[in-house]
Image: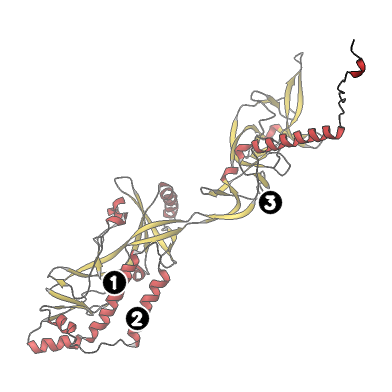
Amino acid sequence: MADDRNKVTKYRRPVNLNIGMVIFAVIFIYVVTCVIMYFKTDHIVGYSVMEGSLTSNKIYKGIALREEEVVNSQDAGYINYFAREGERAAVGNLIYTVDETGRLSEYIKAGESGENSLSDSDLAELKTEIISFTNGFDCRQFGEVYHFKHNVQGTVLKLANYNILENADALNDASGTSLINYRSAGDSGIVVLSTDGYEDLTLEDMTAGLFEEENYEKKYFVNNDLVAAGDPVYKLSTSEDWSVVIMAEPDLVDMLQKELEKEKEKNNELYVEVRFLKNQYTAWGKVDIYTNEEGDSFVSLSFTNSMVTFCTDRFLDVELLLKEEKGLKIPNTAIVQKEFFIVPKGYVTKGGKRGENGVLLETYDDEGNVSVQFVETPIYHETETEYYLDDTVLRAGNDIVMPESTQKFEIRQTGTLTGVYNINKGYADFKEISILYDNEEYSVVKSNTMYGLNVYDHIVLDAAMVDDNEFIYE
């Protein structure tokens, strides 16, 4: 029999629970769980209501319509202009000459006309042209560079042409016949050295295709070009009365049409303020509306001054300065619509410990006995005869009793209110809003209304994330 003294038995250490480790493990599990829940939960973000404004101004591309008279050449030959584009010409002012033989052009090219120097007034005219272009240049409208180039070339050549008039007279005297024909303005107006085919357009001629600039062609008239008799050589804008026509969306047309009808009832015209983006000039334009057979609507804005400023422009970007609404500015994501019960005012009374608004609700016990119980229910909107009450306490089909009477009213009728969820008290409390104006992102609502919002109220930024009376943890 083996000696038990030589047998070794492994000692098992007893389990020793450390209370500190247990507490630490519990806390660790709790923290991990909270972190996971935090990232999985949609967080409700608040928004502080502030005063602000929104403008309903919109920018449109317009077509300028003027009284324009295209003048054709009476002679064939090489043309030279003595009137600068955009310059006002009176009847009888020299506009251009036509050199029938081309000898004047050769004379100029050969340098026989002598030295042509610009006076201080000539240089000032050029500087004005350059400064005007520099101040109004927009790199997104690079085509204006070519128009500027044409204007400068016209100005320089006009100034130079005046210096060679004596040479033209000399050529006529030397030949004994009139080879250089002088042509003056038959009417007074603003000289424009281009045509585009839009000269005879009226509001009733407008179509959507006319606004497509890629199909627009403008023909410039330049010095020393060879022209035939009957070719157009310049045009005159003969009246300060002009208009800009824009293609308008239905909402704008409806709004202007309503305002136009109101003014007509008073025997007045409708005017709106317009800003021209080219030079930020503002003016009041008389409104006329026309809808063509295709259903496209056009708004004409007529002016009685400043035509000369835009006499060379057919397309103009204009901003309609319609209105600016001021109030409480809130994001559209905060706006929600909610249904309420509508009850006559005579059925709403005050009661309870705090004297709050409520109704006398008819209830039944298990034995069918009828009793009347005061139920507190906030008012969210009112008309002259009715209140809008919360539908979370009351139910359709409930009967309420008029105070100090046996007359009953069955709750059935509902109405929808537009509002936001106010979270000043820590829960989602619906507040009605009255929208003055809105755009794609924000709305401006009335402030200090009876059941609405005030400055510095906190509302839910995204109303779709909460339910009515839900407690809010931001």
Whether residue 409 is visible here, answered yes or no, is yes
> Real-space Cα distance between discs 1 and 3?
58 Å
Q: Which residue is mark 1?
A: 150
Please, is residue 361 above or below residue 224 in the view? Answer: above
Amino acid type, label 2: Glu
Disc on the earlier residue, 1 or 3: 1
In the figure, is residue 362 to the left or right of 465?
right
Amino acid type, label 1: His
Q: Which residue is mark 2?
A: 125
**Residue at the far left in the pictured view:** 176
Please rate how many residues cluster around mark 2, counting C-alpha atoms within 10 Å: few if below 14, some from 14 to 19, many from 20.
some
Please rate how many residues cluster around mark 1, counting C-alpha atoms within 10 Å: few if below 14, some from 14 to 19, many from 20.
some
SS under mark 3: loop
Instruction: Tell which tag, 3 or 2, sits nearer the viewer.
Output: 2
Instruction: Tell which tag, 1 or 3, sits nearer the viewer.
Output: 1
- Residue 58 or residue 111, whichever sits in front: 111
Please, is residue 428 above or below residue 170 in the view? Answer: above
In the figure, is residue 402 to the left or right of 253?
right
Label 1–label 3 contact, CB within 8 A: no
Amino acid type, label 3: Tyr
Image position, residue 71 (x, y; %): 19, 69
> Real-space Cα distance between discs 2 and 1?
15 Å
Q: Which residue is mark 3?
A: 456
